[in-house]
Amino acid sequence: MTRPDRNDSADAGAESERVVVRDRRRIDPETGEVRTPPGEQPDGGAPDAFARPEADGTAAELAAQVAERTADLQRVSAEYANYRRRVDRDRESVLVGARVQFVSDLLTVLDDLDRAEAHGDLTGPFKAVADKVVGVVGKLGLESFGLDGEPFDPSVHEAVQHDTTAVAGPTVAVVSTVLRRGYRIADRVLRPAMVTVADRADDGTAADPGPDPTTGY
């Protein structure tokens, strides 16, 4: 091979091995502006024709998940509220039951205190002790009922005697004498009041006790 042929081959090989450098800088060094590569959107994402359906589908899926989680949360909240109400009701029932059991054993003591007071024997240190006992049972929720002249209510009154008097016009049964006090705690009647009942003229101020449960009238 002649020398010129070898030079031509060397030049051709040099051209084939020439390194091509491409400027991939995002900032144009001359203008300072951001370059956008060919085929890419200015915001760096895919074309709107392909991105919008995917975005809409994702939003719908997220909305469905949020609605499902919200429904689950509401259901759990309702179940928890019902549970709390049931627990509070059961706890209150247990507390009232314990109070009823304790105070029921003291009713005879309270009856003795009432009789002593009626006979004028509740004086001095004895009265101080009696007041403390009454204060303790009062804090436990014990209430007494049964007063002369109040309307007769068979649900809380135990009538041992019924006095009928000749009264013109409408009449109403009222308590004439309280022989023994009644007691209750909350809505539980520990003992009805033992009373005598009399018929009196209805002046419109007495409350209707309702029908007698024994007769229905």
Image: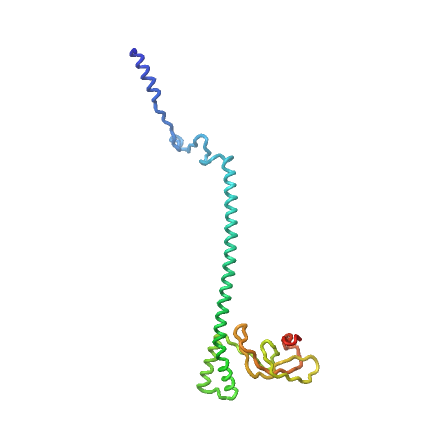
Q: Is residue 133 left or right of residue 192?
A: left
Task: Identify the residue at image location x=61%, y=77%.
Answer: 154
Image coordinates for residue 32, horizontal then vertical, percent: 40, 33
Closest to the observer, 35 or 1? 1
Q: Quadrant of residue 210?
A: bottom right
Closest to the observer, 127 or 1? 1
Q: Residue furthest front?
A: 214
Q: How many marks?
A: 0
Image coordinates for residue 41, horizontal then vertical, percent: 46, 34
Q: Residue furthest left?
A: 3
* Residue 25 versus residue 190 in the image, above or below: above
Q: Residue furthest right?
A: 168
Task: Identify the residue at image location x=52%, y=41%.
Answer: 57
The colour style of the image is: rainbow
Closest to the observer, 117 or 27? 117
Image coordinates for residue 100, horizontal then vertical, percent: 50, 74
Q: Residue furthest top?
A: 2
Q: Which quarter of the figure is the N terminus placed in?
A: top left
Task: Identify the residue at image location x=67%, y=80%.
Answer: 171
Q: Quadrant of residue 168?
A: bottom right
Image coordinates for residue 65, horizontal then vertical, percent: 50, 47
Q: Which quarter of the figure is the C terminus placed in?
A: bottom right
